[in-house]
Image (spheres, helix red, strand yellow):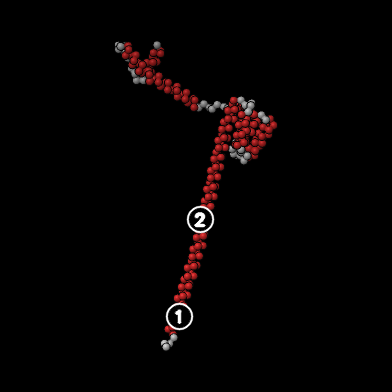
Amino acid sequence: MKNQQRVAMWVAEAGCIIPSMRRPPLFSYLRLLACLVPLLSACAGLGTAGSRVSTETAPPPAPPPVLAQYLETLERMAPGDPARQQDELAATLAAAQETRGSADTLRYALALGSAGHSSSNPVEAKRLISELLASPNTLDPAETAFAEAYLREFDARVALYAELARQREESEQKLKSLDATAERRADALAAENKQLKRKLAEAERQLEAVAEMERSLLEQAGAEAEQPPR
């Protein structure tokens, strides 16, 4: 009875009127169902929104404990303290040379290939991880997946460095070609200038010869004019 009264209250708040028993039963049930459907949809929407908020605010899963040593190495190789980076790189190298173990080799490869330090060598780090994964090792699946992920990263960095080196070489070749072109152009201009100077000197000599000839003719004409007639 209480449940029926509670439903009646919800229906009334939703703007529906409970049908009178004088009307046909089927019409009454349909009217009541039409009023309850929006209420049930609203409740379902609240439940879905609550689940979505709960999912969005859930913290990310923690990494497997077996990866802690590798994450610690990467953290110590972060840029900012060259002395710390060199100490970690030397420590991982010593451990890898001493134990020859898979985990120590992977730690050294990660330290060596990490970016941001003067000794970074992704080419060698890629080779170490490739050989480690290709040979029998003691890495568990999580460590193997971690190594494969960094192998892809080092491979991408090696490809990027190769592309940058190629572009740098092309730029240097273009600059050399431009310099050679400019040098040839300068040589051509110098030769043309020399030729123009030679032509100018020749023209000046010809003008001097003409002027000398004109002076001689004038002198002869003056001398003839001064002689008395015979």
Tell me what residue is drawn at x 46 percent, y 78 percent: 216
Relative to 52, say whether 153 is above or below. below
Does residue 68 appear in the picture of this structure? no
2 or 1: tag closer to the N-terminus: 2
The residue under label 2 is which amino acid type?
Answer: Arg
Q: Residue 88 at what x, y percent from top left?
A: 65, 35
Q: Residue 215 at what x, y percent from top left?
A: 46, 77
- The answer to whether the residue labelled 2 contacts the one labelled 1, judged by CB atoms less than 8 Å apart, is no
Tell me what residue is drawn at x 51 percent, y 60 percent: 191
Helix, strand or loop at label 2? It is helix
Quadrant for residue 71, please give it.
top right
The residue beneath circle 1 is 220
Closer to the camera, 106 or 72?
106
Q: Residue 9 at what x, y percent from top left?
A: 38, 17
Closer to the camera, 230 or 127?
230
The residue beneath circle 2 is 185
Mark 2 residue crowding within 10 angstroms, few (<14) / some (14–19) / many (20+): few
Helix, strand or loop at label 1? It is helix
Relative to 140, say whether 126 is above or below. below
The residue under label 1 is which amino acid type?
Answer: Gln
Does residue 220 appear to the left or right of 114 in the view shown? left
Closer to the camera, 122 or 212?
212
Relative to 177, say whether 125 is above or below. above
Mark 1 residue crowding within 10 angstroms, few (<14) / some (14–19) / many (20+): few
Tell me what residue is drawn at x 63 percent, y 37 percent: 85
Quadrant where the N terminus is found in the figure: top left
Relative to 201, say whether 158 is above or below. above
Tell me what residue is drawn at x 45 percent, y 78 percent: 217
Quadrant where the C terminus is found in the figure: bottom left
Closer to the camera, 37 or 157?
157
